[in-house]
Image (cartoon, rainbow, N blue to C red):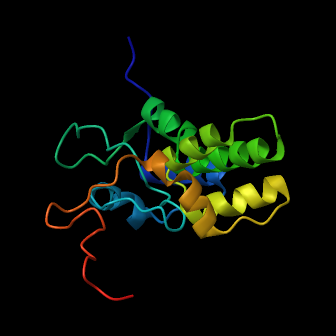
């Protein structure tokens, strides 16, 4: 039984470029584990290294880092950029079809990490009718789950007694 097929850092960079169309620097690949501990954002695109698998355990202290080909290919198939792009495409298609349930597409888009701005733009693109960020957020914000109100504030959000 042979050893598992592996990629070097350069080969991972090659595969990322082939699949995503952008080449990460070798230093970005090396820093991927540290960057992964940061909080993800819905603003902008996910980093090229988002969710990247860690190198395989080193065979010795001096051996170069290698990555499981199987894990790298699985990561590239479900890369956050690809997931977000697919969610946006589904949202636009859903907005274009009056019989579809747009709520389902919006929920999936939020779960994929799309911002409310991107969702509003996608609905506008699909439907051909302008939808504002505020309007879309107001209509679908319940899909993000319950809103927690501070225990110190009343039902009006702590605004009692304040003048407008």
**Foreground residue among 70 and 58:** 70
Disc tally is 0
Query: Is 154 situated left or right of 141 in this image?
Result: left
Is 97 above or below relative to 162?
Answer: above
Q: Work out which residue is located at the far right of the displayed protein and give it.
A: 128
**Residue 69 % position (x, y):** 47, 34
**Residue 37 % position (x, y):** 27, 57
**Foreground residue among 163 and 87:** 163
Residue at image x 56%, y 51%?
Answer: 16
**Residue 125 % position (x, y):** 79, 59
Q: Quadrant of the C terminus?
A: bottom left
Residue at image x 69%, y 46%?
Answer: 91
Residue 58 picture quarter: top left
Residue 63 picture quarter: top left
Query: Is any atom of residue 16 visible in this view?
Result: yes
**Residue 75 % position (x, y):** 48, 39
Is 156 above or below relative to 76?
Answer: below
**Foreground residue among 104 and 35:** 104
Query: Is 39 situated left or right of 22 in this image?
Result: left
């Amino acid at each position: 039984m042979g050893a598992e097929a592996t990629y070097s850092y350069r080969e991972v960079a090659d595969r990322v470029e082939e699949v995503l169309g952008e080449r990460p620097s070798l230093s970005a690949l090396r820093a991927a584990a540290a960057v992964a501990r940061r909080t993800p954002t819905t603003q902008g695109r996910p980093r090229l290294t988002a969710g990247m698998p860690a190198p395989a355990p080193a065979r010795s202290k001096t051996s170069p880092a290698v990555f499981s080909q199987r894990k790298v290919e699985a990561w590239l198939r479900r890369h956050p950029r690809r997931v977000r792009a697919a969610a946006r495409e589904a949202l636009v298609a859903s907005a274009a079809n009056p019989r579809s349930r747009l709520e389902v597409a919006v929920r999936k888009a939020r779960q994929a990490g799309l911002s409310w701005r991107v969702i509003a733009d996608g609905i506008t693109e699909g439907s051909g009718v302008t939808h504002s960020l505020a309007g879309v957020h107001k209509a679908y914000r319940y899909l993000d789950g319950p809103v927690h109100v501070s225990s110190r504030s009343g039902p009006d959000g702590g605004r009692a007694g304040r003048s407008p």
